[in-house]
Amino acid sequence: MGYALPEIKKKGWTALVKELGYAGATKFILIYEAGEGNYTRERKELFKNETIDAIYKEIKK
């Protein structure tokens, strides 16, 4: 009997992290994870009432 999908996902992630580290594993996954939407267009709406200083302070937090 094979592994259930959640177990395959966990084992695969563990193997990727072991071989590539967290940053490399994340980059590998992003190659296959197609995003959706248009962030360039959407960020104008998301941040229309924010200043650069406010965004920077939030990131630093």
Image (tube, rainbow, N blue to C red):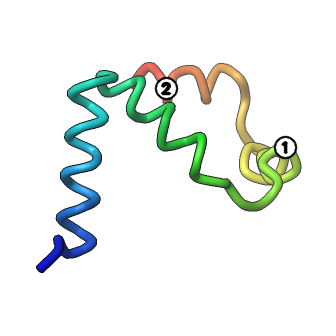
Residue 2: mark in rendering: none
Instruction: Check disc 1 and give the amino acid type.
Output: Thr
The residue pinned by badge 2 equals: 59
The mark nearer the N terminus, 1 or 2, is 1
User: Where does the image place residue 40, in percent across and percent down from the top left?
Assistant: 84, 43
Count of numbered circles on the image: 2
User: Where does the image place residue 47, in percent across and percent down from the top left?
Assistant: 74, 43
Q: Which residue lies furthest to the right in this view?
A: 41
User: Where does the image place residue 55, in percent across and percent down from the top left?
Assistant: 61, 29
Q: Residue furthest left?
A: 1
**Which callout, 1 or 2, points to the residue nearer the camera?**
1
Secondary structure of the residue carrying numbered label 2: helix
Q: Is the N terminus in the top left, top right, bottom left or bottom right quadrant?
A: bottom left
Closer to the camera in the image, 38 or 50 = 38
Q: Residue furthest bottom?
A: 1
- On the picture, is 4 further left or further right than 1? right
Q: Is residue 4 above or below residue 27?
A: below
The residue pinned by badge 1 equals: 40
- On the picture, is 35 further left or further right than 42? left
User: Where does the image place residue 37, in percent across and percent down from the top left?
Assistant: 77, 60
Residue shown at the point (23%, 68%) measured from the top left: 6
Residue shown at the point (17%, 74%) measured from the top left: 2
Closer to the camera in the image, 60 or 16 = 16
Q: Estimate how packed mark 2 is, as few (under 14), some (14 to 19) or many (20 or more) residues with alpha carbons within 10 Å.
A: few
Instruction: Check disc 2 and give the amino acid type.
Output: Ile
Residue shown at the point (58%, 49%) measured from the top left: 32
Closer to the camera in the image, 19 or 53 = 19
Secondary structure of the residue carrying numbered label 1: helix
Q: Is residue 56 above or below residue 38?
A: above
Residue shown at the point (33%, 23%) measured from the top left: 20
For the residues labelled 1 and 2, the Cα–Cα distance comes to 19 Å
Q: Is the C terminus in the top left, top right, bottom left or bottom right quadrant?
A: top left
